[in-house]
């Protein structure tokens, strides 16, 4: 079974702090994704990566950056957290061989910015 | 751009009732369509998918048929159980070469005994 793990289930940070959210997948997937989930808005793509050190902006990249130094790990960085970044963050991965692929999701990190 | 519209919830049903959650989409080209489910406290998991028109996806008693003429992918189950209580997301992936999912807003289903 594919396993996608996220470093924290719950996180509380203060405005202006630098925040790191970590995601690890154990199936040698090429593609990794970061989404945020908000009530009434569904899931929105922040960034995705299709290879080590490669990244592309999703629909809402403002205020976020990402890092992918190793194939299995994809980090989401909030350079200076703001209250409007309070949300549930979901990481996902997919094989990356082309075609229609299933994305496998982690359990999510619920971030509260005070 | 691509978009997915699904019926707003919450939806509350009694056990063994029939379930329909409507989903329509707008997309260029020939998208693939998905239903994901999120159980309380968990991440999303794929429930079923369909990759071309008239395909039917099915899993765990749930079904959805890809209807190109009505741009729809409605989720159905003949007899829901309490364990089906979750949030259901309809999603699409654009045509060839695309690996970005576009999600609907989600529909919360509660099944009561």
Image (tube, helix red, strand yellow):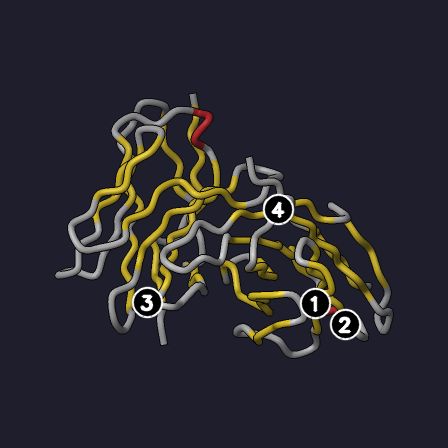
Residue A110 is situated, as x and y percent measured from the top left of the image, at: 70, 52
Circles 1 and 2: CB atoms closer than 8 Å: yes
Indicate which disc residue B96 carries: 3
Q: Nearer the viewer, mark 4 or mark 2?
A: 4
The answer to whether dots 4 and 1 both sit on one chain is: yes
How crowded is the residue under tag 4: few (<14 C-alpha within 10 Å), some, or many (20+)? Answer: many
**In-front residue for pair B45/B88:** B45
Q: Does residue B89 lie above or below A62 as drawn?
A: above
**In-front residue for pair A75/B64:** A75
Q: Output the chain of dot 1.
A: A
How crowded is the residue under tag 3: few (<14 C-alpha within 10 Å), some, or many (20+)? Answer: few
The residue wearing badge 1 is A85
Q: Nearer the viewer, mark 4 or mark 3?
A: 3
Indicate which disc residue A106 carries: 4
Residue A87 is situated, as x and y percent measured from the top left of the image, at: 66, 59
Q: Output the chain of dot 4.
A: A
Q: Residue at x 45, y 57 (%)?
A: A97
Circles 4 and 3: CB atoms closer than 8 Å: no
Q: Output the chain of dot 3.
A: B
């Amino acid at each position: 079974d594919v396993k996608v793990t996220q470093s924290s289930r719950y996180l509380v940070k203060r405005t202006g702090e630098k925040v790191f959210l970590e995601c690890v997948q154990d199936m040698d997937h090429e593609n990794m994704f970061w989404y945020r989930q908000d009530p009434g808005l569904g899931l929105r793509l922040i960034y995705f990566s299709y290879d080590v050190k490669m990244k592309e902006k999703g629909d809402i990249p403002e205020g976020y950056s990402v890092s992918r130094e190793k194939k299995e790990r994809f980090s989401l960085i909030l350079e200076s957290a703001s209250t409007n970044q309070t949300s549930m963050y979901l990481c996902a991965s997919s094989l990356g061989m082309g075609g229609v692929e299933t994305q496998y999701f982690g359990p999510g990190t619920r971030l509260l910015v005070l | 751009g691509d978009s997915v519209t699904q019926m707003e919830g919450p939806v509350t049903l009694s056990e063994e009732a029939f379930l329909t959650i409507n989903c329509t989409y707008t997309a260029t080209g020939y998208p693939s369509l998905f239903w994901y489910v999120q159980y309380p406290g968990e991440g999303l998991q794929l429930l079923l998918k369909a990759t071309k028109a008239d395909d039917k996806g099915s899993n765990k008693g749930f079904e959805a048929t890809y209807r190109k003429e009505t741009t729809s992918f409605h989720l159905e189950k003949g007899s829901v159980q309490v364990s089906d209580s979750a949030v259901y997301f309809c999603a699409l992936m654009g045509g060839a070469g695309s690996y970005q999912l576009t999600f609907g807003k989600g529909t919360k289903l509660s099944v009561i005994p």
